[in-house]
Image (cartoon, rainbow, N blue to C red):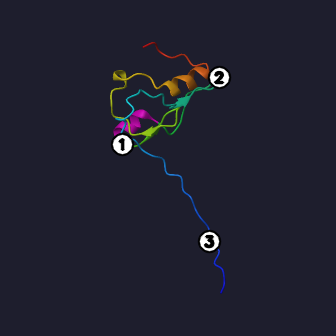
Amino acid sequence: MSQLDTELIVESIPQVDDGNHERFTHIVLEGYTPEGGEFVPVDNSVVGGIINSTPVKALCGKVWVPGRDPKKYPLCPTCKEIAQSMGWDLPNG
């Protein structure tokens, strides 16, 4: 008998949440402006996610399709901690 070689392939598929179970407002990095340069967008637009029903990824790692009013929910503590550690100014409230 011959032994068959097998290879296990693991594919990482992000879990997409409907956004209802956590009820937090998340921070999504949509781009950056280098010193003395122009805004450079990244492929993670909240507006694009709303219009096209495509998922976005927050600083904390949460992936979801945006569609709720973020003003109704408190700021995600993990997103807040990451943003503050990077020296970003956050709005009060």
Q: Which mark is residue 67?
A: none
Q: Secondary structure at mark 1?
A: helix
Q: Looking at the image, which residue is at 39% across and 38% down?
A: 49
The answer to whether 28 is drawn above or below residue 17 in the figure is above
* Residue 75, position as x, y percentages in the image: 44, 23
Q: Looking at the image, which residue is at 36% across and 21% down?
A: 71
Query: Quadrant where the N terminus lies?
Result: bottom right
Q: Amino acid at mark 1?
A: Asn
Q: Please give the residue where the numbered disc 2 appears in the rendered image.
A: 35
Residue 52 is inside the magenta segment: yes
Residue 85 is inside the magenta segment: no
Q: Please give the residue where the numbered disc 1 appears in the rendered image.
A: 52
* Residue 13, position as x, y percentages in the image: 49, 51
Of pointers 3 and 1, the one earlier in the residue sequence:
3
Of pointers 2 and 1, the one earlier in the residue sequence:
2
Mark pair 2, 1: CA separation: 31 Å
- Viewer-nearest of discs 2 and 3: 3
Say whether residue 66 is left or right of residue 2.
Answer: left
> Start and end of the magenta stretch?
45-53
Q: Quadrant of residue 32?
A: top right
Q: Quadrant of residue 35?
A: top right
Of pointers 2 and 3, the one earlier in the residue sequence:
3
Q: Looking at the image, which residue is at 40% across and 41% down?
A: 17
**Cβ–Cβ under 8 Å for marks 3 and 1:** no
Q: Label 1: how many residues lie within 10 Å, few (<14), some (14-19) or many (20+)?
A: few
Q: Please give the residue where the numbered disc 3 appears in the rendered image.
A: 6
Which residue extends farthest bottom?
A: 1
The answer to whether 8 is drawn above or below residue 55 in the figure is below
